[in-house]
Amino acid sequence: AQTVTQSQPEMSVQEAETVTLSCTYDTSESDYYLFWYKQPPSRQMILVIRQEAYKQQNATENRFSVNFQKAAKSFSLKISDSQLGDAAMYFCAYRSAFGNEKLTFGTGTRLTIIP
Amino acid sequence: DGGITQSPKYLFRKEGQNVTLSCEQNLNHDAMYWYRQDPGQGLRLIYYSQIVNDFQKGDIAEGYSVSREKKESFPLTVTSAQKNPTAFYLCASSVGVQETQYFGPGTRLLVL
């Protein structure tokens, strides 16, 4: 079974600075998808970024980018120019590409932005 | 506006009572999902449906039931057999089961 581990329960960053959230996963599959979701105080899960395992290039979405290391099974999220609105819980998630519909989530990292 | 709506926002259940959580989407998505979130944990899959009139159990289906009579709707019933129902429930949908899942705003269920 696949597992997703987020080893940082809490992180904080000064406004306008850069922060990196860590995620590792365990799988025996070769093709899969990885996601970062943001859950603000409203508790709605919002997609931040998605990465296909077969793609070498790291995904980027405005101030958000990932460092995908397939061999190391690592998928970290970098947030540049941190803003107060970035404060939230961030969840890393895995989904197989082979007919398995389930998203497997990590336990989350609470990000605090210091003004 | 296209999106996923869940109602109610808060729901209270008495002992031995069945309650139903609503999930509606107007995104024309084929697949829909129900997840449960407990404090300090990530989301866990309860049930999912790939098409109308078909649904599959997830990891924690015991004590829950669903129906999928319409493409737009995927209600979740928390039955009296679910002994620890207090949690935050999130509904999601995707174009197909291989596509990105998008989430509704959630329902907080509390037991009186």
Image (cartoon, rainbow, N blue to C red):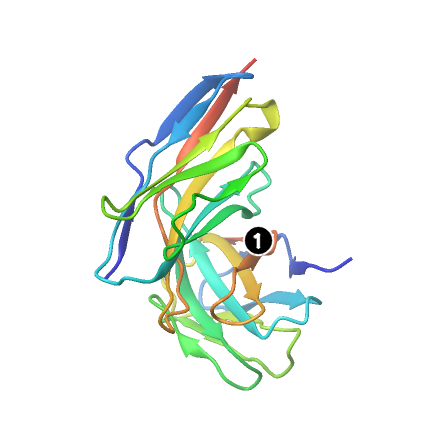
Q: Is residue A85 left or right of residue A56?
A: right
Most distant residue in the right direction: B1
Identify the residue shown where x is 63% and y is 52%: B9
Relative to A43, is A11 above or below? above
Relative to A62, is B101 above or below? below
Relative to A4, is A76 above or below? above
Of B81 and B48, nearer the camera is: B48
Most distant residue in the bottom direction: B53
Of A57 and B95, nearer the camera is: A57
Of B112 and B60, nearer the camera is: B60
The chain that hosts pointer 1 is: B
Q: Is residue B20 left or right of residue A67?
A: right
Quadrant housing residue B12? bottom right
Q: Position of residue B82 (x, y in %)?
A: 39, 66
Identify the residue shown where x is 78% and y is 57%: B1
Q: Position of residue A115 (x, y in %)?
A: 57, 13
Residue type at numbered disc 1? Gly
Q: Which residue is mark 1?
A: B106
Identify the element where label 1 is drawn: loop
Identify the residue shown where x is 59% and y is 35%: A62
Identify the residue shown where x is 34% and y is 32%: A9
- Say whether residue B111 is visible: no
